[in-house]
């Protein structure tokens, strides 16, 4: 049967939510469906569906308004100032809020586990993304970095920062150099560079076509693309290949964007894997929270049944559960902020300063508000959805049934069991995926530094690198 | 003992009259009759609100019919005017009649 034979399901659901009284809800939905069928026959499906939407929204809005007015005071005072309505809402909300708070405090174990789980997941995601952003996405943060290209062939906070140094002479490698300017903070190209001096080659060095250690950095002119640069360099390389086939035949013509060219190969894969792992962790956390909330809410079937029997509306109970979920999420977010700071601090502290100098973007590692709030919103959504599903199951059922059956044999609890089993299964599956992933990553890391790949025994070996000034150690004899 | 009079609004007055006109009155034919006889559009939401209010005042009572397939298994809600509703209707009708007395020359003009 085509779905268009029946009214728009979403509109029906919305209307059902808006009309608090169950008996009225059923008769109104029935009336509208009866008219929908007549309209579909006489006017066609499209107009009938549009008509249904407009009616559902209009009646729903009126239903909500009537509900608010009833809560605000007696029906005789229907047209009192709007402020009274809002006071009614506020009073209701603060009561619900207090009740939610008491509920959370009454089961401190569950609440604490939900809050800590969510906070850990949010903090892990924010930290991973902060690292990805700093090391892979935007390692170099200075103006026009998009227009810089690399053609293949210092930390300034360390004492050179006095502006009066400009014009003075300093000795580098024993040679006097005049200081002509100071680079902006964060400008460390190549990585770890602290001082830049012009190339001073001898004629012999200039004519040596076998020196290939230099890498040129250029700025694209206004309006030029990286492909234009590639074409131009290819033309030059071709010409040189023809001109000097002996030395230039094998020289590749490679032009890369600045960020791409300067990045460490492998960093992107490594950090992206870490991000995927933390996303998995967030999913596991959500499944965990969902399970906990489901378990907690099945214990509350009695409470909801009782409140329904005493005249509480379904909308009110739903609202109550939403407030509880919101409260849990807010507390988790408050906890996640210091956790993220702590983890970023740990990451920073785990790498020695001498190495950090060579890691592009390490200093710009920071909490990104967008990611923090996205992770928080994701967690909030999970908490809300999984607080609402069991609530909906309880609240939608018949009051008498809810009160009578608290045993496991009812349909509602069978459905709930199914949901819980599904959640538990997905939790285990995700955890296994994460475990395997972590295992593979560790194995790969271990293999990368394994002795076998180097061809020697790495134990009890110390590696050091000594850079000697060029002039005093010009000949090979002295270097030895 | 005389009970306190129930005041009816113009729309409620119309709704009670429509209920009396229809053999098996529920919201759909009530609204159709109101539109047909008054020549004015009637919002469904307004009708449901009025019916709920009339029930609250004790002017009508309602019973649920059997669920039917063409209504997606939802029952109809049938309304009946209560004796109190009838009294309120007569009082309002009388009040209007009193007010219009002597104005026939103006009101009956085409």
Image (cartoon, coloured by chain):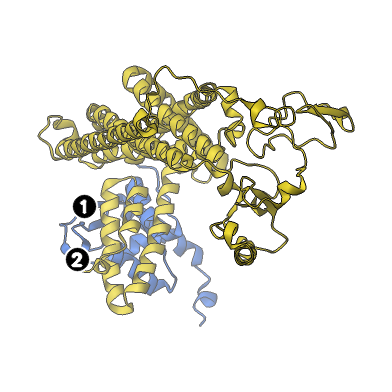
Name the side, left or right, on which A93 lies relative to A178.
left
Q: Are marks 1 and 2 in contact (CB under 8 Å)?
A: no
Residue at image position (36%, 26%) is A114
On the picture, is A291 further left or further right than A253? left
Viewer-proximal residue, B21 or B78? B78
Q: Is residue B30 visible?
A: yes
Residue, disc 1: B63
Q: Secondary structure at mark 1?
A: strand
In the image, which is nearer the foreground, mark 1 or mark 2? 2
- Give the chain letter at badge 2: B
Residue A298 screen position, x and y as percent = 22, 30
**Do marks 1 and 2 share a chain?**
yes
Q: Position of residue A240 (x, y in %)?
A: 64, 63
Residue A424, image x and y in percent? Answer: 22, 34
* Apparent colour of chain A: yellow
Residue sitting at 55 percent across and 60 percent down? A249
Label 1 crowd bin: few (<14), some (14–19), many (20+), radius 10 Å: few
Rendered location of residue A385, percent (x, y): 34, 40
Q: Is residue A467 visible in this depiction of the protein?
A: no
Q: Nearer the viewer, residue B3 or A306?
A: A306
Residue A321: name its quadrant.
Answer: top left
First-in-chain label (1 vs 2): 1
Q: In which quadrant will I find the C terminus of chain A? A: top right
Q: Chain of mark 1?
A: B
Residue under the image location 48 percent in, 39 percent down: A267
At 21% from the left and 41% from the top, the residue drawn is A397
Chain coloured blue = B
Left or right, residue A36 beside residue A245: left
Farthest residue, direction front:
A477
Q: Name the mark on residue B70.
A: 2
Q: In which quadrant of the rendered view does residue A233 lie?
A: bottom right
At numbered mark 2, what does the secondary structure look like: helix, strand or loop? helix
């Amino acid at each position: 049967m085509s779905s268009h034979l029946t009214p728009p399901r979403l509109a029906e659901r919305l209307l059902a939510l808006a009309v608090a009284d169950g008996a009225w809800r059923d008769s109104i939905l029935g009336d509208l469906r009866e008219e929908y069928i007549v309209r579909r026959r006489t006017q066609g499906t499209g107009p009938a569906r549009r008509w249904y939407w407009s009616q559902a929204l209009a009646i729903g809005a009126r239903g909500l308004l009537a509900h608010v007015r009833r809560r605000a005071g007696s029906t005789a005072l229907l047209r009192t100032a709007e402020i009274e309505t809002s006071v009614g809402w506020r009073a209701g909300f603060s009561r619900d809020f207090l009740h939610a708070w008491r509920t959370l405090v009454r089961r401190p174990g569950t609440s604490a586990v939900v809050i800590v789980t969510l906070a850990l997941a949010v903090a892990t995601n924010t930290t991973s993304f902060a690292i990805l952003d700093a090391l892979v996405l935007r390692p170099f943060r200075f103006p026009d970095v998009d227009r810089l290209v690399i053609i293949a062939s210092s930390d300034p906070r360390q004492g050179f920062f006095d502006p009066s140094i400009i014009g003075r002479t300093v000795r580098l490698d024993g040679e006097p150099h005049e200081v002509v300017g100071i680079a902006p903070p964060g400008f460390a190209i190549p990585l770890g560079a602290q001082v830049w001096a012009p190339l001073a080659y001898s004629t012999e060095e200039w004519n040596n076509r076998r020196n290939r250690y230099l890498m040129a950095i250029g700025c694209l002119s206004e309006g030029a693309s990286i492909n234009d640069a590639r074409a131009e360099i290819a033309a030059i390389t071709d010409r040189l290949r023809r001109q000097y086939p002996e030395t230039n035949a094998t020289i590749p013509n490679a032009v890369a964007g600045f960020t791409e060219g300067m990045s460490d190969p492998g960093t992107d894969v490594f950090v992206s894997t870490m991000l995927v792992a933390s996303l998995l962790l967030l999913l596991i956390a959500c499944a965990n929270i969902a399970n906990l909330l489901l378990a907690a809410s099945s214990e509350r079937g009695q409470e909801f049944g009782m409140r329904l029997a005493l005249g509480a509306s379904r909308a009110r109970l739903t609202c109550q559960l939403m407030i509880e979920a919101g409260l849990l999420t807010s507390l988790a977010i408050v906890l996640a902020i210091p956790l993220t700071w702590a983890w970023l601090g740990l990451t920073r502290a785990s790498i020695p300063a001498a190495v950090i100098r060579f890691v592009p973007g390490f200093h710009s590692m920071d909490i990104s508000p967008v990611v923090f709030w996205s992770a928080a919103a994701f967690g909030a959504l999970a908490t809300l959805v999984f607080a609402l599903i069991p609530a909906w199951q309880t609240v939608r059922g018949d009051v008498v049934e809810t009160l009578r059956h608290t045993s496991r044999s009812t349909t509602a609890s069978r459905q709930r069991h199914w949901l819980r089993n599904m959640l538990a299964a997905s939790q285990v599956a995700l955890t296994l995926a994460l475990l395997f992933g972590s295992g593979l990553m560790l194995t790969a890391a271990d293999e990368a530094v394994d002795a076998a790949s180097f061809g020697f025994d790495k134990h009890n070996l110390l590696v050091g690198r000594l850079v000697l000034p060029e002039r005093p150690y010009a000949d090979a004899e002295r270097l030895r | 003992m005389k009970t306190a009079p129930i005041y009816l609004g113009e729309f409620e007055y119309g709704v009670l009259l429509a209920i009396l006109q229809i053999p098996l009155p529920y919201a759909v034919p009530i609204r159709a009759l109101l539109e047909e006889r008054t020549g004015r559009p009637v919002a469904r939401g307004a009708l449901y609100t009025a019916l709920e209010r009339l029930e609250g005042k004790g002017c009508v009572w309602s019973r649920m019919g059997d669920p039917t397939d063409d209504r997606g298994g939802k029952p109809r809600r049938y309304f009946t005017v209560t004796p109190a509703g009838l009294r309120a209707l007569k009082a309002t009708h009388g009040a209007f009649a009193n007010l219009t007395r002597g104005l026939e020359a103006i009101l009956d003009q085409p």
